[in-house]
Image (cartoon, coloured by chain):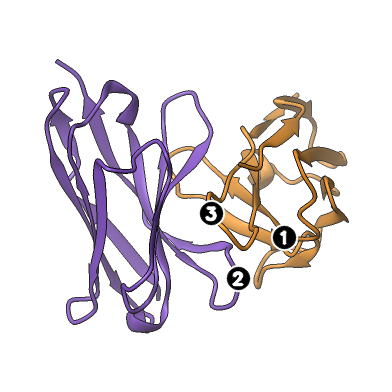
Chain colours: A purple, B orange
Amino acid sequence: EVQLVESGGGLVQPGGSLRLSCTASGFTFTTYELNWVRHAPGKGLEWVSYITSSGKTIYYADSVKGRFTISRDNAKNSLYLQMNSLRAEDTALYYCATFTRKWHYFEYWGQGTLVTVSS
Amino acid sequence: DIQMTQSPSSVSASVGDRVTIICRASQGISTWLAWYQQKPGQAPKLLIYGASSLQSGVPSRFSGSGSGTDFTLTISNLQPEDFATYFCQQANSSPPWTFGQGTKVEIK
């Protein structure tokens, strides 16, 4: 069974940092492209960041560019998101999600970890 | 960036009804479109990709159509487990990959 389990969310003050983790099992992690997608309260889903299976190609949404860093450790079946200079508008449920093998559709999702940025 | 606009934002329907949700892209995306279902407290679930291809395990009462800028998700014979929020997503080759704002299907 495919499982993606996020962790690392919490309450942080504006300007603070958090590191999210996503641990995967039940599929060949090293062959999947991965993403972080967030869902802010009362808003739609927003793609945040993408990383190829090798980690060599990375993209970010403009809203987080320069503040967030995505990475992965294929030996540990893990995906990470380092979030710095956090803002109130970063408050959201953060999901890790795989793309399908061939195209840019989000196939497998975790249950999410909640990040709240507030003083 | 490609903007995705869904309508309506919510719809009330009864079990057995047919429900249609529309998604419009701000520019042509061929058939690079997916639909997702999300229930409270759960992660989104991929229902349809390529505008009309049913993901494995998804009931055949879900169908998708469209190409270019206009797309439709249809739920025929609405079942109790179908009451949820539905999102479209454009899967163009380049990021950002964007979602519609969602359509909530509620019980009438």
Location of the N terminus of chain A by quadrant is bottom left
Residue B95 is tagged as 3
What is the chain letter for disc 3?
Answer: B
Q: Is residue B42 left or right of residue A69?
A: right
Residues under numbered marks 1 and 3 in contact, where contact means CB atoms less than 8 Å apart? no
Residues under numbered marks 1 and 2 in contact, where contact means CB atoms less than 8 Å apart? yes
Judge whether A72 appears above or below A20 on screen: below
Question: In which image quadrant can residue A119 be found?
Answer: top left
For image coordinates 56% across by 51% down, the residue present is B97
Q: Secondary structure at mark 2?
A: loop
Question: In which image quadrant can residue B49 be found?
Answer: bottom right
Which residue does the numbered mark 2 point to in the structure image?
A103
Q: Nearer the viewer, residue B108 or B97?
A: B97
**Residue A59 image position (x, y, % from top left):** 40, 57
For image coordinates 60% across by 70% down, the residue present is A103
Alpha carbon separation for disc pair 1 and 3: 13 Å
Residue at the farthest top position: A119
Which amino acid, by three-letter code, is at mark 3? Pro
Judge whether B8 appears above or below A25 on screen: above
**Residue A74 image position (x, y, % from top left):** 24, 79
Which residue does the numbered mark 1 point to in the structure image?
B32
Which amino acid, by three-letter code, is at mark 2? Trp
Judge whether B27 appears above or below B51 on screen: above
Residue at the farthest front position: A66
Which amino acid, by three-letter code, is at mark 1? Trp
